[in-house]
Image: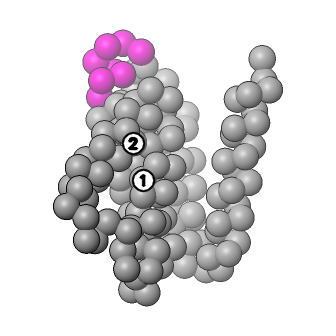
Amino acid sequence: MKLFSKSHFAPAVLLLFGFLAGMANGLFGMGGGILVFFLLRHIYADDPAVSTKDVFASTVLCVLIMSLSSVFLYCRDGYVSFGDAVPFLAPAVLGGAVGAFLLDKIDTKWLKKIFAVLMLYGGFSLIFRK
């Protein structure tokens, strides 16, 4: 059974999570994807047709859309320019393509562990770094 499938609050919950994910992405430049992944993973937890890899891929699409919204406002308000990102664009596109290719090749249990390690590292570095 899907977590929200029989609740009349499902649209409100989805809208709230979407808003919070977008806000986290806009505030921190990241984090929205974590919320989206958490929500989708729970919604589709008991659906055998939706794998963890499907959830990762769907999350990436959501992050892209949230990031485009944020980057437009960051550029408009002068926080960043396109030139600031140029050195990272080609390697990021290449890395994204390699990651998408590897998504199908890596066992889901390893993807979860890698994701968890990255989240722990990011959290600890934010807490303990000056």
- Residue 2, placed above or below residue 17: below
Viewer-closest of 41 and 82: 41
Dividing the picture into quadrants, the one containing residue 74 is: top left
- Residue at 39 percent across and 42 percent down: it is 21
Q: Which residue is mark 1?
A: 36
Amino acid type shown at disc 2: Ala
Q: Residue at x 51, y 73 (%)?
A: 52
Q: Dominant secondary structure of the magenta stretch?
A: helix
Crowd around label 2: few <14 · some 14–19 · many ≥20 (10 Å): many
* The one of 103 and 59 positioned closer to us in this rendering: 59
Q: Is residue 41 magenta?
A: no
| Rendering quarter of residue 130 | top right
Q: Secondary structure at mark 1?
A: helix
List x then y, in percent, for residue 51.
47, 79
Q: Is residue 125 left or right of residue 83?
A: right
Residue 32 can be seen, yes or no: yes
Where 64 falls versus 55 (above or below)? above
Q: Residue at x 36, y 57 (%)?
A: 61
- Residue under label 2: 21
Magenta span covers which residues? 72-79
Residue drawn at (69%, 38%), measured in percent from left and top?
Answer: 123
The secondary structure type at the circle numbered 2 is helix
Given the current orientation, which residue lies at the most extreme top position?
78
Disc number placed over residue 114 in the picture, else none = none
